[in-house]
Image (cartoon, rainbow, N blue to C red):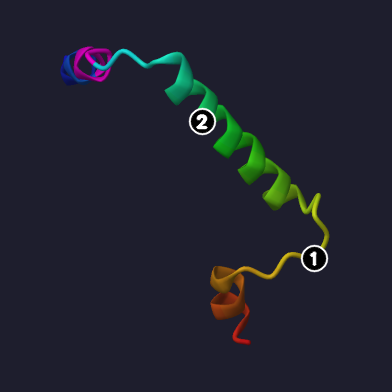
Amino acid sequence: MEDEESNDSIQCHSWSKKEIDILLELVIENKKLLEGKHGPLVTEANKRKSGW
């Protein structure tokens, strides 16, 4: 089972509270951006995608 081996290697890194907080903050921020909570946001990536 290769999947079990890869899971073991992931668990080798023990996440600190600070790292988890940073990750959660990024995830929440990303969700807000995706849902358009900040209004019509034009990022550089979106400019390229829509051909501005």
**Distance between the Cα atoms at labels 2 and 1?**
25 Å
Say few, some or many: other residues with alpha carbon within 10 Å of mark 1 (under 14 / 14 to 19 / 20 or more). few
Q: Is residue 6 left or right of residue 18?
A: left
Q: Secondary structure at mark 1?
A: loop
Quadrant in which the C terminus appears: bottom right
Q: Is residue 1 left or right of residue 41?
A: left
Q: Provide residue 6's location: percent of width, then percent of height.
A: 20, 21
What secondary structure characterizes most of the magenta part? helix
Checking the image for residue 40, the label placed there is: 1
Which of 31 and 29 lies nearest the eye of the viewer? 29
Q: Which structural element holds mark 2? A: helix
How many numbered marks, from 0 up? 2
Specify few, some or many for label 2: CA neighbours under 10 Å numbering under 14, 14-19, or 20 or more.
Answer: few
Percent position of residue 28, x then y = 65, 35
Residue situated furthest front in the rendering: 18
The answer to whether 11 is drawn above or below residue 41 in the figure is above
Q: Quadrant of the N terminus?
A: top left
Query: Which residue type carries mark 2?
Result: Ile
In the depicted structure, whether residue 51 falls above or below residue 20: below
Amino acid bearing label 1: Pro
**Residue carrying label 2:** 22
Any magenta on residue 1?
Answer: no
Q: Which residues are magenta?
A: 7-12
Identify which residue is drawn at 62% across, 45% down. Answer: 30
Depth order, front residue of 17/29: 17
Q: Residue at x 31, y 13 (%)?
A: 14
